[in-house]
Amino acid sequence: MSALAVDGSAQYSYASLLSMTNSFSVQNKIGRGGSGDVYLGRIGSSQVAIKVIRTIQGMQVDDTEFRRELSVLSMCRHENIVPLLGSSSEFGNPLCLVYRYMPGGSLADRLLPSTTVLPLTASERINIAVGVALGLHYLHQPDRERYKPSIFHRDVTSANILLDADMYAKISDAGIAREADSSVTMTGGMGTWGYIDPYYLESREFTTASDVFSFGVVLLELLTGLQAFDSSQQPRDRNLFRRARRSVVPADARAGFDDAREKLLRDLAMECTAEDIEDRPGLEDCIARLLGEVREAEPDVVPPPPAPAPTPAPRVRECVVCMDAPPRTRFSPCLHSACCQGCVGELILRASPRCPICRERVQSFEVGDFIDTSGRTIEGGGGGGESVRPPDEMYVEQLVPSGGTVSRGGRTLDARNLSCIKTLTGHTHKVYGVAIAGDVVVSGSSDRMVKVWQISTGSCIKTLTGHTGTVNSVAIAGDVVVSGSRDVTVKVWQISTGSCIKTLTGHTHWVSSVAIAGDVVVSGSYDKTVKVWQISTGSCIKTLTGHTEAVVSVAIAGDVVVSGSYDKTVKVWQISTGSCIKTLTGHADWVYGVAIAGDVVVSGSVDKTVKVWQISTGSCIKTLTGHTDFVSSVAIAGDVVVSGSYDKTVKVWQISTGSCIKTLTGHTNSVYSVAIAGDLVVSGSWDQTVKVWSTDERYVGQLVPSGRTFDARNLSCIKTLTGHTDGINNVANAGDVVVSGSYDKTVKVWQISTGSCIKTLTGHTDCVNGVAIAGDLVVSGSSDHTVKVWQISTGSCITLSGHTDVVVGVAIAGDLVVSGSWDYTVKVWQISTGSCIKTLTGHTNDVFSVSTAGDVVVSGSSDNTVKVWQISTGSCIKTLTGHTSWVNDVAIAGDVIVSGSDDKTVKVWQISTGSCIKTLTGHTRGVMSIAIAGDVVVSGSSDETAKVWQISTGLCIKTLTGHMNRVNDVAIAGDVVVSGSEDFTVKVWST
């Protein structure tokens, strides 16, 4: 029925799941989560919950993404996380996850009034809060010993908190959870209304404080018994946390709260949902305060040690490692009991083991019968156990591989004017390794591919496939490319033929880094060794041992090899003798990247520093500081060092002065690899792109027509158009006509002079996010993934299909329609044929807005960039960077582009130079919408205002107030401004 998968969870056939669930019958359906429907099934005598992953209409869930997320879920072993038992991912069938069944149901259901189930007591509610806090804290903490990264849940709700038979809480629906540094998720989404952190909606930055906010809303539900979001209430009262801020919401009378417990939950809930994230407590504080209440609680929370009378012992809960046997070991000094006697062996095999519950370092184990989290014995007392002290020095494998690359020879570049001249897109997952030689760049990715690019054209000239695991590192020399992979192999490729000419095997764990010099290849591995290979024979000529932990980076120069390791050292080796000639110590954490040039070695570390070493003396001659996160990769050429970091930047340093000459920004995720050759720098990032940087600006965009201006000083509201039954997302105007699109799934056409709705256009099956108008034609984009073109006079429409996610922005010019989507693409359509004539790719996140003029399209994205495209060639001619958060809207007029962002600013750009000529500040929340006419810009914001700006002076001429909720869109034509808002109204402003 099942087999053990690579990640340690069982792999089930789809046929077996059909058998377990009576073919996923309605009778077996027990719930619906944020990512799919849930069915009750049976494996033997055990009950399981099987989630069928729901796909977005017209889009397949990427199997690779599914496996990536599955690997993250499989790492999560904690008593307050619903255990993942296995999965099914057969081609042609739905993707499924198999979890342990929780008979207590969801917290959301248990809080509802019921005539058949007793209400949760105050003690049970406090205990549930403790469990949720412990589970969230576990998700947030990286566990290098279990390969688990820091994880944000992103959808903490009462529906996603399940209860076992004894009312212990377990967090579920990690289908939306993702690594803290990841930009990829299987099911997408930003959470559930009522629980979403307002700071996240405004900044688009998700932090641990955002999960804390959602936890605070759950605390309010536990306290009041009310729903987090109630659509039957007035708009301002729909969110429970907003009601609680304005007035005291009564506690649930069914729970029987005393004053102390009510105050604890209320105070903690209000602190967790504080508007300023700096005012929110950490989960450690939440746990301490809640546990303080538990320890002082009556016996129904944590039973006291049994008296001499034969009182039944409380239930022994499961081991957090195998999730099966009861825990029979207790850790000292924290006194948590977490593992069965069998699984404690896994911890003994680790260096510096930590308690899986509180993460405190374990000094000794005690074997006995214990309750999991209380630290009290059930039977046998505290002194009856056998003490087992873990070894001091044991090897533990780590998850994060190296991006260290070989240094490239060549002349020193002048870095002061360095800019990005090419962004190479095509990888479908994180880029781990890059290398450069002449006009050629090579990149390796977790999509298991090696790509060869031509810098001058920006095109991918070869895709090399054959690895069955992530490609961690690449190197290039002439027509030869070398790649190292998590499939434990090194491959040698010939670019001209695209063929693999050698597969080098011998490592017993992931290959983390490779380097090449002539007929020699060097590889570093998690098996703690460095291997030297001869390409012509395919044989390993030397195995260099001495590192005490994983080797994650290597470099070669002549007879010398340099390696960096998790043991915090850099080693210098002589190939001919196989001996280590120098061990360089000084880094305070793992060494991720190394490079060599002559007598100089450069290393980058998790300690956020770059060190420059002299081999002959073994001394550190420079420590370069400035990165704010791990340094993942380094490269060297003459007096110049380049470093890439998890802080998303590339830094260029001058060794002689020790100063940072240039910081290159533009990547939207961690930079994992860098290379340098001549005046070119190349960087590879987890944002799935490769960037080429140079002092040579190779393309300048073309000019487009401009509009006219008007006097805005006496602008006032002349019409309020009402009729939509939900928030208005987008507006456009032309002459006496206004068009609006709404969450109510309709497009309305209004006549300004009469204030009446002259047409309601229906047909979209989800909210309308974008509208545009030209004469008798209206264009709309929707969350149903379609673009519709309407004729106002007849009300008829054609539907343009092709996007695979939400369509947010649309624009129209003559026979052309442009649309931007959350599928990261911009599409250009021909109305007369109904066909897509261009798909523009390059954004690394959702496209929120588009604007067009002539042969030029402008797009704004949640990757924080504005891109300028040429329709005729389909190429990106400019990427404008400078916003620090999502770009929500863009507009174009002549050589000028205007963009509005969640960073609360409006930026004015000059296309021809690619420079920002004005930054307009004054909004107190994110800027949602932009319009331009000549020297005038109009902006709408989440601060419920629209502002009118003069570009030439940079001044705000007028602030338009009157909306009762955020202004989602604005438009301008002549002396008329139109605004649409979440308050369900459209306002027309004029002098």
Image (cartoon, rainbow, N blue to C red):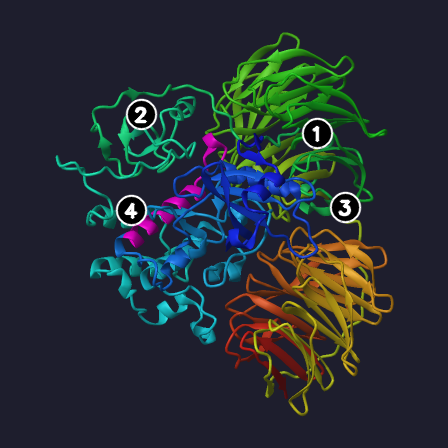
> Which numbered disc flags the more N-terminal residue, 3 or 1?
1
- Find disc 1 in the rendering and name its residue: 467
Q: Is residue 913 visible?
A: no
Residue 959 position, x and y percent, is: 55, 78
636 left or right, relative to 327: right
Q: Nearer the viewer, residue 247 or 878?
A: 247
Q: Residues within 10 Å of mark 3 (few under 14, many from 20)?
A: few
> Which numbered disc flags the more N-terminal residue, 4 or 3?
4
**Is residue 218 depicted above or below 660 in this figure?**
below
Asked whether residue 129 is drawn in magenta, I would say yes
- In the rendered structure, find residue 288 and report the number of the disc placed on it: 4
Asked whether residue 533 is drawn in magenta, I would say no
Residue 327 position, x and y percent, is: 34, 31
166 left or right, relative to 776: left
Residue 501 position, x and y percent, is: 79, 22
- Find disc 3 in the rendering and name its residue: 696
Q: Which region of the structure is painted magenta?
A: 124-148
Distance between mark 3 and mark 2 Cα atoms: 62 Å
